[in-house]
Each structure stands twice: as structure tokens, then as C-alpha cells.
Image (cartoon, helix red, strand yellow):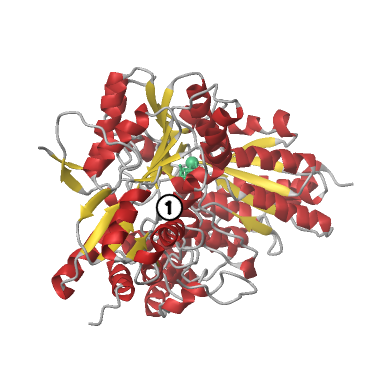
Amino acid sequence: MPLIQFREALNQAMCEEMQRDPEVFLIGEEVAEYDGAYKVSRGMLAKFGPQRVVDMPISECGFAGLGLGAALVGLRPIVEFMTFSFSLVALDQLLNNAPKIRYMSGGQFKLPIVFRGISGPGRQLAATHAWSVDALCTHVPGLKVVAPSCPYDAKGLLKTAIRDDDPVVFLESESMYTLRQEVPEQEYLLPFGQADIKRPGGDCTVVAWGQSCVIALEAAEQLHRENGLEVEVVDLRTLRPLDLSRIIQSVRRTGYCVTVEEGYPTCSVGAEIAALVQEKCFDDLDHAVVRVASLDVPMPYSKPLQEHVVPDARRVVQAIQQATYFQG
Amino acid sequence: MSTVAEKNQKLEPAVTQMVDWYRQMLVIRQFELRCSQSYQQQKVGGFCHLYMGQEAVAVGSLAALRPSDYVITAYRDHGHAIARGTGLTALFAELYGRATGCSHGKGGSMHFFDRGKNFFGGHAIVGAHIPLAVGMAWAVKYRAEDRVVACFFGDGAMNQGAFHEALNLAGLFKLPIIFVAENNQYGMGTHVDRASAVPDLKLRTGDAYGIDGKDVDGMDCLAVYRMTRAAAEYCRGGNGAIFLEAKTYRYRGHSMSDPQKYRTKEELARYQEHDPIGRLEEQLKARGALDERKIEALRQEVHAAVEAAHHQAEQEPWPQPDDVWKDVYANPFGPYQL
Ligand SMILES: Cc1ncc(C[n+]2csc(CCOP(=O)(O)OP(=O)(O)O)c2C)c(N)n1
Ligand SMILES: [Mg+2]
């Protein structure tokens, strides 16, 4: 199997779907002539031409709406936000029009559109550029939210997203773009709503997705090596639909649960999972669910400050030790 | 008996003032040369957008304003902060993420702020600060103050909804704002002709929002000064807002990581022939205010000042981890910690 980067997996998914269906097209800032600000759409202009891979002005509200309008009449747009921090000027399209038009019309319309791009803090970009929109988007009924953690999942999930008839928010991460993994050449799709056990273990359940899964796995490896703790990492893959039964099965076995995410802690996805786990597994838990998230502050620029705010493997290790009453 | 000629006379700068502009432009250029080195040495993080090539716009326009006027700009903000008079050490310290930086290490290159100089940032979401300028001008009018607001942004920002809403508001309420579009012809890798239905930017505000649009050679500091001076008089006279398009060019990539395949070396070289610093140098030589000896002395002085600020900034203290909790609120209620 060829070893490819996360960004190539996304590129392959888009190319395969565009080859398969002439109604799929890609729009966004710098996606065509520049090959994508983060090179995700490299070569796609040459492959599909300027009618299907189109550079947009810096008008997120306009082109997010353009995508929705095209979807309303049956096309299947992929809208790239350079990062989801810039989708905030388009939130009315993203959080109001996209999830609600079908419902308000009594089901007369499908909105087969994918909004994709980077979510989460980059390297020292400061407060306005560091949004994790996971919780914001997952909050809204009518949207589907996907957050892959590895190239294999990214490809299979993006293909499913493009074929899905509902608006899908597809969250990527700058630091993950260069992750490499072997990905099969033959076609495959991954279903929404199926979490994946990225590492089995019986001592503690860690629930993560996207970039947070990468650090959860690092922490699990460290605890295995240093403390002999066997941590089970449940990668949600999609936040909506949420594979609650997979989480419950795991927590029933381990008795402990830790959530890991990059976004703000207040009203976060981790908060939602903690609430659900205590509802469904109250008698199975031997400790309260412990949440790892960003500190509850806007992202600072200065390097040591950002490092203090963003969760890392060290914080996940501490959380697991706390949750399992581990005595060094 | 105020004739047009007399009025124009009044708008002319003294030669000593022009020598100071020259010095300011040298400072900005030198600051950014050092900045780009420091970036390569990873002393600067995040996105860093250099202003090289555009110096005449910030220097010429801000020279036409008063310290009491309000200034706000986008993320390509080094030139504006320097022209506004913020100390170089505080700017380097910000780039280096230090506690004594002009934004206490919270902002970085894209978010220079200096309340004391009426410099309101440094804003990194394209177009998002333009409505803020409208609100600042609203406050000026509300309090019947004698101030104007200068709001800088790029050609690309003119395609944001925020720009259009802001201009309508400014036109509707006749607010004292000078909108300065720094048309460096590219928004990242996209040429203005590929992004704007009407690429002649000065035409985009008159009929649409009742705000007169003019353009000016943004590589000519004196021309920018004259235009802004007239614009400021217009705003102070209660006539409402005005729109200036400064035609300029950026020498470096959009940010520090831009392979610049969208333009040719020849195109860049063509603009560098009209370098704003060289241009003013010629004008001042022609007026007898500068000669080679003075130029050399000025260059050395500027170089020394920039190096001293950079070295000082490297000695400045790092912020402490607990500083992340500081300045979230004006009336804090204590940290909520997981
Ligand atoms: C809303 C939003 N969309 C996209 C970006 C990413 N971005 C940063 S600068 C830039 C180009 C802006 O071009 P222009 O307004 O011409 O200013 P210049 O960089 O040329 O000074 C883009 C697309 C952003 N910061 N904010
Ligand atoms: Mg520009």
C-alpha cells in the first residue's frame, strides 16, 4: 500500500469523487492557481479545469452561501475554508442556512455540501486565528461533523461526506497534514457514526477525535511504557452522529473515562460526552469523567504561553493518572 | 482671500519634515530586514507579513494626521506602528513574545497595539476591523471631537461583506473616516483583477456609498501626504468619509512562507525601480536637503537604532504561565480551570 500524507489522502478523496460525479466541484481561497494555501488541492486545477476548481475572492460569507445555493439546486460543492477561523464571517450560512433550510421547507430540499478546512490552533497565530469550531458546529442539529485523525480515515470519511446528502463540516488540522500512513489503492468509504478503537486497553477509556487523538495515542503509549497502564483510545471520527454505544461499551469495561480536545473547555464536546457518560454509565464509573481541553482563555501569541494553553500528551497523561487514582 | 494656491501652499510640508519621513521609511525597512532574519532564526513565530515596498503609504498618510487622530489597520501592521511612533524595542519584544511587547506577548506580528499612540491595531481577520473604524468615528462625532479616523486595509479586504456594510454606514452617517486601501495588487496569491468585479478600486465607493474615491501613487510619499492632508481637511470639515486607493506593491511574499509563483521576478524588479525610499531620496537631494554624506550618516544611525532595539528586546523577560489568565476581562471573576 502506498504511504501517503494526510493532505494527499484528502486530495485523493476529492479527485476520486470529482471523477465519479461531474456535479462535484471545489471552491475556496487559493484552491486553484496556488494549489491551496496548505497544498491540499495540489494539481486539481490542472486535472479538472477552472470550471470545477475555482479561486474565490476573500468573501467567505458570499462563497459559503454560493455553495449552499448551488447545493439547493442539486450540485455538490466542496467549500474550502483556508481555516475555520475565517468561517466565522460566514456563520449565518454555516450555522443557520446550511442546517435549517431542509427542515424549514418540510424536507423539500437536500443540501449536499461539504465545508472543509483547518480547525484548531496553528503555530502562534494568536487569538482570532486559533479557533476549534468542533463544539460550535456540533451544537447545531442539521449539520454533520467529521474530524478524522489519520490519512486512512480522512480519505474514507471525506468520500462519504461528499456523497452524503446533508451539509457536512469536515475538520482538519494543520499539524496533521504531514502525517503519513499506508492507504489502500482500491476504493473504500468509511461510514459516519462509527467510532474506531485506535488502541485497545482495559484500564481507562480515552475519548478523542482529530488532532486530539494524536496526543491521546502519545499519552497512551507513554503510560504503557512507563506505568504499565493499558489505555483504550476511542477515536470518535464523527462528532455528529456520535457513536455513543462504542463509548459506553468501553467505559463499562474500564470504569474510567477521560476526554481530550483542543477547543475551549466550557460547553465543549468533552462536556457533552461527560454528561452522556454519567447518564448512561453512572454505576460503572469509579471516578468522575476527567476532561482535557485548552485552558479557558483566548489563545496567546507568545510561544511559552501557547504551549501552556494548548493541551499536550503530558496533560493527557496527568488526566489519566488522576482519573484512575494512579499512584506513581 | 484664500486662493487655491494659498491653500495648496498650506498643505506643503517643510523639508525637515520630509527628511523625517525618509528616516521613518529607513527605520521600517531596516526593522523588517531584521524581522525577517529573526523569523528565519525562529525567534519570531506565527504569521509575519512584511510591509517592504509599501512604506510610503503608512509614512505619508500618517504624517498628515495628528497624534489625537485614531488609526487602525490590518495584520500587515509594522509600518503603521512605527510611523505612529511606537518604540522599536516594544515592537521587537512583541515579535519575540516577551512580556514587555507592545501587546504583552499576546498579539505577535499581526496584532501590534498602542493605546497611547491612538493606534488601535493590528487585526488579522481580513476586513473585520473596518466596521470598528466606523464605530470609532461614530464616537468622534457623538462627542463632537476634532479627530479623524484613518483605516487601512488591503485590496483583498474590499471583497469582504464587512467592508461593504462599513462603507454604507460611514456614508449614511457622514462619519469622519479616511479609508485607505493599500492596493498592492495581490490578496495572498490572487491578483486584484482575478478577485474584483471592478478592479479600479476608487470607483467602488462613490456611487455605491456616497463616499468619494481617489487614487494616489502609493510609492510617492509626498503624493500620499498631500492626498491624505486634503482628505483629513475634508473629514474635519464635517463632510463625511473619503476613500483613498494607494497604488503600491509588496516586495516580499504574502507572509514568510510564500513561494510567490504567481508573479515574475521581472514584475517585482519593475516596481523596485520605483522604490519609495529611493524616490523620496531623489526628491530631497533635488531640494538640497540630502547629500551622500547625510544619507550615509542617517543609514548608519537607523541601523544602529534598530540593532539596539532588537538586542534589547532579546533581553526582555518572557511572560509567566499565569499571564495567560490576565486580560481576559476588564473586571475579572477569577479563572475557571478544568
Ligand atoms: C476572513 C479571512 N479570510 C481569509 C484570511 C486569510 N488571509 C490573510 S491575509 C489574506 C490576503 C489579504 O489580502 P489584502 O487584503 O489585499 O491585503 P495584503 O495582504 O495584500 O496586505 C488572506 C486571504 C483571513 N485572515 N481572514
Ligand atoms: Mg493586497
Which residue of the protein is positioned furthest toward the left in this rendering?
Answer: A1
Query: Where is A97 relative to A172, above or below?
Result: above
Nearer to the camera, A181 or A50: A181
Q: Is the CB of mark 1 within 8 Å of ligand 1? A: yes
The x and y percentages for residue B47 are 40, 55
Image mark 1: chain: B
Nearer to the camera, B252 or B207: B207
On the image, which quarter does residue A170 sit in?
top left
* One can see residue A24 in this view: yes
Nearer to the camera, B110 or B85: B110
Nearer to the camera, B135 or B224: B135
The x and y percentages for residue B323 are 48, 76
Q: Is residue A135 left or right of residue B80?
A: left
Query: Where is B187 relative to A267, above or below?
Result: above
Which residue has dot 1 on it? B49
Which residue of the protein is positioned furthest toward the right in this rendering?
Answer: B1
Q: Is residue A98 left or right of residue A232?
A: right
Residue at 49% across / 67% down in the picture? A296
The x and y percentages for residue B64 are 67, 55
Which residue of the protein is positioned furthest toward the bottom in this rendering?
Answer: A328
Residue at 70% across / 30% down in the picture? B208
Which residue of the protein is positioned furthest toward the front in this rendering?
Answer: A283
Residue at 45% across / 46% down in the picture? A84
The residue type indicated by label 1 comes to His
Q: Is residue A232 left or right of residue B1?
A: left
Check disc 1: other Cα within 10 Å, few if <14, some if 14-19, many if 20+. many
On the image, which quarter does residue A252 sit in?
bottom left
The x and y percentages for residue B46 are 38, 58
Count numbered badges in the picture: 1
